Image (tube, rainbow, N blue to C red):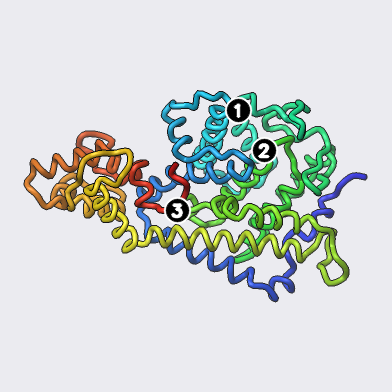
Amino acid sequence: MRTSILSLAPYIPSDQALAQSSLPDKAMTVMTQSAKLTGQLSPLTFATLSRYMRVINSYYSNLIEGNATKPYEIRAAYLGHYASDPAKRDLQLESLGHIHVQEWIDQQAPNLDRLFSPEFIQDIHRQFYHAIPESLWIIRNEKGEEMGKVVPGEWRVSDVIVGQHIAPQAADVAALISGFCDIYHPKKYQGDRKLIAIMAAHHRFASIHPFTDGNGRVGRLLTDAALKAVGLDSYGAWCVSRGLARTSTLYKSALAGADTVRQGDYDGRGALSEKGLLGLCDYMLDTAVDQVAYMSDLLNLANLRKRIDSYVLARNDHRVAGVSGELKSSAGLVLYSAFIQGELPRSQALELCAMPARSARRLLSQLKKEGLLSETSSKSPLRWEIPEHAEPWYFPDLAPVN
């Protein structure tokens, strides 16, 4: 039997169900907190954070799929330092592939029409698989036997069962994705419904399972891009995947709950359970609230100033791994000011050092050498950076450091 897009209804919870839930309030909280975070970050600081968070997002999104390559291993691979074990090397390259797609999406800056199109979804998949080793294109069964190979950017051509979920027939995928893009285009929703629709779409995409493999990561990348495109401008300084990975059992349970068929007359009017979809959206919005609040707290000016000063103290107590040498106490003010402004004119940086010119230049040279500040030329302003040795002090518990 052919599968119609109607088999995925309800597409979002009904107005009546939403009015009896806390979803609209949670969606507004995400939007409000995200806007507040945008307002406290300079564009250059946001750009630095976004580059840094691509590694974090890659780590957590791949972790959900069983790739536990740590951020420090990803950064090592980015510099060309790979594990000697071929399997671990491939997983490092897989993580880099995920970062590549994030960079590619940011460069594309897709408008909503392009983002919600089958072609763009296929492009995400194609970009990911073309950036990872072909050894990871092979599909194996539970016994490790080769069952096929991914074709980058192409819809699957065989039927699949994912856990307890029987995905739609392969012949129906193209039509279902076309209907998906039309139904979930944000132009059809207003206010809090935009975010609720994106969270519902996250499940419906997974339910269609349009590709032979890579659906989880493509789905999360699509959700990331959609959240950014509908106006969460600080998205990129925080990411949903961190929360999904840290509560992966709840994540998978919520996805499974939204797969449930309608449970009687009090469970909506679609083929699938409205209660299950409400639960999925509630979980996704809770995760978003948690993650934007977590990063907002980390990036609170007073809190970050304390952690920068703690880093300087730790340097002078020789407690910072991966770097040697002490720092003058005024380094904290220089780094904090660079965070606030995104970059510092050299004259201001020298003044903030509060020491004779020669000593000040020596301190700034040290901060550049150690990756705490960067420059584009010998006369350019100095930009705030996040070197690996400062990461545990700037952003404790954001991700494993070893």
Q: Earlier in the sequence, mark 1 or mark 2?
A: 1
SS at mark 2 in the image: loop
Q: Name the residue at 81% across, 58% down.
A: 260
Is any part of residue 131 visible from this angle? Answer: no
164 relative to 301, above or below: above
285 relative to 387, above or below: below
SS at mark 3 in the image: loop
Q: CA distance from mark 2 to mark 3?
A: 28 Å
Q: Name the residue at 54% across, 51% down.
A: 242
Q: Which residue is mark 3?
A: 397
Task: Using the image, tell me which numbered label, if any, was put on residue 214.
Answer: 2
- The image quadrant of residue 269 is bottom right
Task: Using the image, tell me which numbered label, if any, was put on residue 317.
Answer: none
Is residue 54 toward the left or the right of residue 368 in the image? Answer: right
Q: In this view of the protein, which residue sits in the foreground, 227 or 335?
A: 335
Hey, which residue is sitting farthest right in the picture?
A: 1
Q: Earlier in the sequence, mark 1 or mark 3?
A: 1
Q: Which-is-in-front pick, marks 1 and 2? A: 2
Q: Name the residue at 69% across, 57% down.
A: 200
Q: Which residue is mark 1?
A: 130
Three-letter amino acid code of the residue under disc 1: His
